[in-house]
Image (cartoon, rainbow, N blue to C red):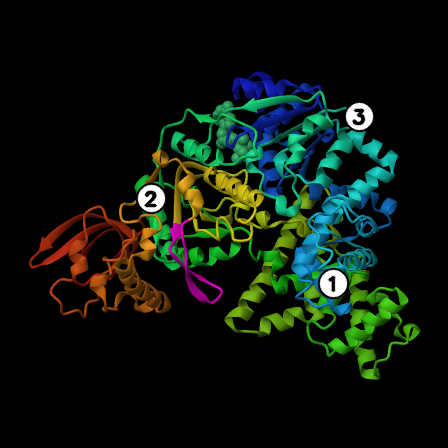
């Protein structure tokens, strides 16, 4: 059913409605978190469609593929599936990759170009640094790649880089005089491999539009209306694409919040939003002030924090939702305990509030923090999904298979070639690859061309090696042939079989090996799914190149396969941008972690960290819990930690701190730390020997004496001859317990049975049970 225009605008407040209705000039919606910016975009698109603008005239750019999908499905609800499908909606990278494939010729690429993901790029930089015999301490590949990336995002080509010493403030020429040369070689190698990295997608789009007026005109005519979400995080290259496309008709609407600009490390430039008016002088600015997402306490707490930033556009944000609970701040003895406390609290809140696991999110500053929470959640059988980190498509076995596909589609792809020339092992060693590589450099050919006719290039290898190279060459040629007639799924099966990967994977019966072969199977499933979806959409020939394009643009934020699943979400604050959850845990709020040690020396860096914290808090609808640990395992040792300065910046009226934790003083309190250590040792032991968790009996009395919140009590096994364990006595009505066999349940009453006590427990899955406390195996959570 299609809503009419009236009901569409009815779902908006006055300010939002005005922003939606203004359609014939540039507009900028600038407003705080949760005030409905994304909602304005969604409704504006629906409104334009209602007015009769054909969907393929609309270009909508989002920050993640996930955001694009979500927006599309909301629009489908408003105006119907069919119209929503034909919108040009996606990330800058996915939309412009599509355009670049169409126009590849004009910029000297073939349309089957490979897209390098960040680890491919990283590898290539590393290789070049090695080739140039540079010291990789002085030229750390990650750092060098960062420099190249920033140059590209500022549209600085290698030539410009060399010519202009003023242009790049962030470059340290004196210390790294060879960066320019690395950049140049990197760019040449990519081109020779008919490949682009992520930043190229934006840079070449700009070059395409700059140098080919007729092509620019074509897209200017097509994209009659341009909309961009999260504009505060666009970089110069993205800003310029928008500017070029909108330069004639000026029908462009961007939305954003300067207080949520968190990607400056990737070249995002807050000035794009601040100067939007100077790009399009007749811009109409709309401000939204009512937050519909969060409770008053959360909105007020977030406001009090962000006020501390000096650089910002003044905004009033208020909520008319319920006042809500104060934000709880929990201090734990260690990072390990932090994990347990959060897992316990999630379990408890879920039962108490009848909420779903998917109502919870744990947000952290760095990916590495996830492991602790994964462990603690797993231990409690709490299902979770994790965004970022090593995603499915980043796993080695998957990248290896994908490398076959890449080489088949684009034999010049050097990175793919190197990955699989000797995988599975076929006796072609590094020395041979080195020779092929030198010949390629010398003759300015791709590695593939060298092995196609090694004799032409005087490749100096023995006859055995020659044979093996030839066998590899023939194998790939056979796949290239079949790529003409088979679809992506059929060819993938063929590749796994003929290359020997399938054989190798299925032989390995170690747990790691099994998980690798499961992953490979999962990849086949994904390809199959991809092919059938496209077929349903009416496309006939769905080759590997289509699948590859899709895969290479998946970002950390998109690798979630079980979208609807009932799971706790774990992600970095960065990837939580734009999302919302009923209950949010912001963890690891410690100095040198959040704010991170790298950024806090500069005011600008510190302000960005503060914005990041602001983003984290404002993801919460109903509750926001903040935790920090007073000691943390870092770089192989336990180091003590101090709570983040940002915690003191929040107006105390909106936060609640447990009575037994106080800022800082706790870390110096020796007595407290003594109990903490005891408890810590205990917890560590339990985690090591999960099976014995119910049968250990030492240091029991210290268990509850520790300083922090997580009440973790163990009740011991039937062999106990003690009359009644101290812990068991403490079990009370209303406690949530975890039973070894029955799982989680709530104690509804405690009764005496002869000399023994027993508890009546309502288990979630096992139903009502009576437990004799001296025998029962459970712990209180
Ligand atoms: P962020 O800055 O975090 O991206 P945002 O400004 O884009 O936030 P939205 O995500 O669009 O905000 O909206 C926040 C929440 O408030 C959403 O759940 C949205 O549906 C709801 N909302 C926004 N405006 C209204 C409204 N007028 N009536 C009811 N709900 C609204
Ligand atoms: Mg938004």
Q: CA distance from mark 1 to mark 2?
A: 48 Å
54 or 20, nearer to the observer: 20
In the rendered view of the protein, which quadrant contains the N terminus?
top right
In the displayed structure, 145 sits above or below 353; it is below
In the displayed structure, 260 sits above or below 80; it is below
119 or 563, nearer to the observer: 119
Q: Earlier in the sequence, mark 1 or mark 2?
A: 2
Q: Residue furthest left?
A: 754
Q: Could you tell me residue 402's position as x and y percent?
A: 69, 60
Q: Is residue 361 visible?
A: no
> Residues at badges 1 and 2 in contact (C-beta under 8 Å)?
no
Q: Mark 3 = which residue?
A: 248
Disc 1 residue crowd, few under 14, some 14–19, many 20+, Cα 10 Å: many
Residue stretch rendered in magenta on the structure: 628-643
* Residue 182 inside the magenta-drawn segment: no
| Residue 336 lies in quadrant | bottom left
* Residue 641 inside the magenta-drawn segment: yes
Q: Mark 2 = which residue?
A: 349
Residue at mark 2: C-beta within 8 A of ligand 1: no
Q: Could you tell me residue 387's position as x and y percent?
A: 53, 50
Q: Secondary structure at mark 1?
A: helix
Numbered badge on residue 415: 1
Disc 2 residue crowd, few under 14, some 14–19, many 20+, Cα 10 Å: some
Please give the name of the residue rendered at 30% of the width and 49% of the height, measured from the top-left corner: 661
Q: Earlier in the sequence, mark 1 or mark 3?
A: 3
Q: Secondary structure at mark 3?
A: loop
Q: Could you tell me residue 281's position as x and y percent?
A: 72, 22
């Amino acid at each position: 059913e299609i809503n009419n225009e009236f009901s569409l605008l009815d779902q908006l407040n006055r300010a939002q409605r005005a922003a939606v209705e203004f359609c014939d000039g540039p507009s900028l919606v600038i407003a705080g978190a949760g005030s409905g910016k994304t909602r304005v975009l969604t409704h504006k698109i629906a409104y334009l469609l209602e007015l009769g603008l054909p969907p393929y005239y609309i270009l909508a750019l989002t920050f993640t593929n996930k955001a694009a999908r979500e927006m599309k499905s909301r629009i489908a609800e408003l105006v119907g599936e069919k119209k929503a499908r034909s919108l040009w909606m996606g990330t800058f990278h996915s939309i412009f990759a599509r355009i670049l494939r169409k126009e590849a010729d004009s910029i000297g690429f073939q349309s089957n170009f490979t897209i390098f993901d960040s680890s491919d790029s990283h590898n290539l930089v590393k290789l070049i640094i090695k080739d140039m015999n540079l010291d990789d301490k002085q030229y750390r590949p990650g750092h060098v790649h960062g420099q190249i990336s920033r140059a590209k995002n500022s549209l600085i080509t290698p030539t410009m880089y060399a010519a202009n010493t003023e242009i790049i403030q962030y470059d340290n020429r004196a210390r790294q005089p060879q960066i320019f040369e690395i950049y140049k070689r990197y760019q040449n190698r990519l081109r020779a491999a008919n490949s682009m990295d992520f930043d190229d997608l934006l840079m070449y789009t700009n070059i395409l539009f700059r140098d080919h007026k007729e092509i620019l005109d074509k897209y200017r005519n097509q994209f009659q209306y341009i909309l961009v979400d999260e504009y505060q995080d666009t970089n110069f290259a993205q800003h310029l694409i928008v500017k070029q496309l909108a330069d004639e008709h000026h029908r462009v609407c961007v939305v954003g919040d300067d207080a949520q600009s968190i990607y400056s490390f990737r070249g995002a430039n807050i000035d794009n939003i601040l100067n939007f008016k100077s790009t399009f002088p007749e811009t109409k600015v709309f401000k939204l002030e009512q937050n519909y997402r969060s409770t008053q306490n959360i909105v007020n707490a977030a406001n009090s924090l962000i006020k501390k930033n000096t650089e910002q556009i003044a905004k009033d944000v208020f909520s008319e939702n319920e006042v809500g609970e104060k934000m709880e701040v929990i201090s734990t003895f260690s990072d390990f305990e932090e994990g347990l406390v959060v897992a316990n609290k999630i379990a408890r809140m879920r039962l108490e509030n009848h909420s779903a696991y998917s109502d919870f999110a744990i947000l952290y500053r760095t990916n590495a923090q996830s492991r602790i929470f994964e462990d603690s959640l797993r231990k409690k059988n709490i299902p979770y999904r994790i965004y970022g980190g090593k995603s499915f498509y980043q796993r080695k076995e998957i990248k290896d298979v994908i490398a076959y596909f890449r080489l088949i589609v684009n034999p010049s792809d050097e990175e793919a070639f190197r990955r699989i020339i000797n995988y599975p092992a076929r006796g072609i060693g590094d020395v041979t690859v080195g020779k092929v590589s030198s010949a390629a450099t010398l003759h300015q050919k791709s590695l593939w061309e060298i092995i196609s006719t090694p004799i032409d290039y005087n490749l100096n290898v023995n006859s055995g090696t020659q044979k093996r190279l030839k066998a590899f060459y023939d194998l790939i040629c056979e796949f290239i042939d079949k790529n003409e007639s088979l679809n992506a799924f059929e060819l993938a099966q063929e590749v796994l079989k003929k290359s020997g990967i399938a054989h190798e994977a299925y032989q390995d019966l170690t747990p790691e090996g099994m998980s690798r072969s499961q992953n490979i199977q999962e990849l086949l499933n994904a390809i199959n799914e991809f092919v059938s979806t496209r077929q349903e959409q009416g496309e006939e020939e769905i080759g590997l190149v289509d699948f590859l394009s899709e895969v290479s643009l998946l970002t950390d934020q998109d690798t979630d396969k079980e979208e609807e699943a009932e799971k706790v979400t774990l992600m970095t604050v960065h990837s939580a941008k734009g999302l919302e959850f009923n209950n949010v845990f912001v963890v690891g709020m410690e100095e040198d972690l959040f704010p991170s040690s790298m950024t806090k020396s500069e005011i600008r860096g510190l302000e960005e960290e503060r914005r990041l914290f602001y983003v984290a808090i404002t993801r919460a609808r109903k509750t926001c819990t903040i935790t920090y640990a007073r000691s943390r395992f870092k770089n192989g040792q336990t180091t003590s930690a101090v709570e983040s300065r940002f915690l003191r910046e929040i107006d105390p009226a909106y936060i609640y701190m447990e009575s037994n934790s106080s800022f800082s003083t706790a870390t110096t309190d020796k007595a407290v730390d003594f109990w903490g250590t005891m408890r810590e040792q205990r917890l560590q032991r339990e985690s090591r020997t999960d099976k014995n968790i119910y049968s250990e009996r030492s240091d029991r009395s210290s268990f509850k004496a520790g300083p922090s919140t997580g009440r973790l009590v163990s009740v011991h096994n039937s062999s106990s001859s003690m009359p009644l364990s101290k812990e068991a006595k403490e079990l009370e009505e209303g406690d949530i317990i975890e039973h070894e066999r029955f799982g989680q349940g709530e104690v509804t009453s405690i009764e005496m049975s002869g000399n023994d006590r027993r508890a009546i427990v309502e288990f979630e899955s096992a139903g009502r049970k009576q437990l004799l406390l001296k025998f029962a195996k459970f712990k209180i959570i």
